[in-house]
Image: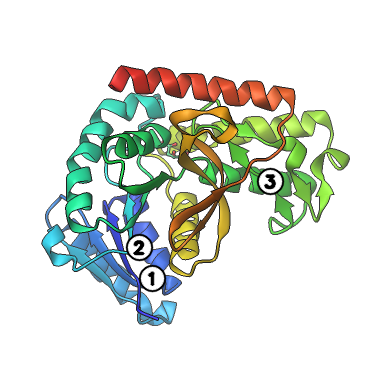
């Protein structure tokens, strides 16, 4: 099998840590690009010098120009501004839309067949923006994949069990409207509702919704990146090895769950061609209403951009 080429655009915290985690997992040849001269080259040197301890011969190649990237099976966009304490993800919209706009033509011209995973916030809006402007781009967003990791972590903590056994998903949008699917969450196959009180479940939901903000409040000048880098790596792994993992990725809706022309984080099977299938799961009335809230907010934001 040919060694996959993975291009990470943005050598900030999320981009460079993703490169390090991907190198550790030997996912392919990793090209790390940043607009800031030599940043990606310094990061790549640092990551590669860790390789004797990571026991991997995978190389990260820092690039100052896209000309240095011969091809890409997967493009991960982490470039853009991160929020500081006191900001919402939506506060980044104008600045980061300009970043995405600048990258779209390059991606389509140089890597038209790549699967494009956008991580930059506000992720659901930017996924929609790229798909709307370049309909042939095979693009999807991180969506609620990071929130799902957090949800599982908080469930495991509350139950006092291994995070491996805690299963669940968060859908909707990657902001305060996100919907942790408590009715579908299980621990070791047992419904979470059978194991935890309503209060404990409420606490998990609220910690999940505020997790990113809580980290940003502590870090002050940027947001979290360790967990993001790991989930980005899992998604890229699912693409390059066609693992068909299921993640709540931000997908462009064409009738899924009754929505059109917006991106929502919905359970998606992802493999070597990108999104293979969006899973339609049974939602109860409250969850339906909550998903409508996410969809209406997305529709309103996208209208303001058109
Ligand atoms: C996160 O949830 O950690 C990321 O979306 C970054 C942020 O701004 O919170």
What is the spatial separation of the Cα atoms under label 2 and label 3, in whole angstroms? 27 Å
**Alpha carbon separation for disc pair 1 and 3:** 28 Å
- State which quadrant residue 151 falls in: top right
In what element is the residue under mark 2?
helix
Which residue is tagged 2? 19
Q: Residue at x 37, y 65 (%)?
A: 20
State which image quarter holds ligand 1: top left
Residue denoted by label 1: 23
Coloring basis for residues: rainbow
Q: Residues within 10 Å of mark 2 (few under 14, many from 20)?
A: many
Q: Are marks 1 and 2 in contact (CB under 8 Å)?
A: yes
Q: Position of residue 185 (x, y in %)?
A: 74, 44
Residue 98 appears in which quarter of the rendering?
top left
Element on which disc 3 rests: loop
Q: Position of residue 167 (x, y in %)?
A: 70, 50
Q: Which residue is mark 3?
A: 168
Relative image position of residue 204 (x, y in whole percent): 69, 36
Q: Quadrant of the C terminus?
A: top left
Does residue 92 appear left or right of residue 179 in this picture? left
Q: Nearer the viewer, residue 11 or 157?
A: 11
Picture layout, residue 59 above or below residue 40: below
Q: Earlier in the sequence, mark 2 or mark 3?
A: 2
């Amino acid at each position: 099998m040919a060694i996959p080429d993975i291009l990470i655009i943005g050598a900030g915290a999320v981009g460079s840590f993703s490169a390090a985690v991907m190198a550790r997992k030997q996912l392919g040849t990793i090209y790390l690009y940043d607009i800031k001269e030599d940043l990606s080259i310094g990061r790549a040197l640092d990551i590669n010098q860790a390789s004797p301890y990571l026991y991997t011969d995978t190389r990260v190649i820092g690039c100052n120009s896209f000309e240095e990237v011969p091809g890409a099976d997967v493009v991960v966009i982490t470039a853009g501004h991160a929020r500081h304490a006191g900001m919402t993800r939506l506060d980044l919209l104008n600045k980061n839309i300009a970043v995405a706009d600048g990258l779209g033509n390059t991606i389509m011209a140089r890597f038209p067949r790549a699967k494009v995973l956008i991580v930059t916030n506000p992720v659901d809006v930017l996924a929609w923006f790229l798909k709307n402007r370049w309909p042939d781009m095979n693009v999807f967003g991180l969506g609620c994949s990071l929130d799902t990791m957090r949800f599982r972590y908080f469930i495991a903590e509350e139950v006092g069990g291994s995070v491996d056994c805690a299963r669940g998903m968060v859908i909707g949008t990657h902001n305060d409207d996100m919907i942790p699917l408590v009715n579908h969450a299980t621990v070791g196959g047992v419904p979470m509702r059978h194991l935890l009180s309503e209060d404990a479940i409420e606490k998990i939901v609220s910690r999940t919704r505020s997790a990113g903000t809580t980290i940003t409040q502590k870090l002050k000048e940027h947001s979290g990146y360790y967990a993001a880098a790991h989930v980005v790596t899992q998604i890229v792994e699912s693409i390059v090895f066609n693992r068909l993992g299921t993640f709540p990725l931000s997908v462009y809706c064409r009738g899924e769950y009754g929505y059109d022309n917006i991106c929502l984080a919905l359970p998606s099977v992802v493999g070597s061609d990108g999104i293979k299938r969006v899973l339609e799961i049974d939602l109860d009335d409250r969850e339906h209403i909550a998903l409508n809230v996410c969809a209406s907010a997305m529709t309103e934001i996208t209208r303001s951009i058109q």
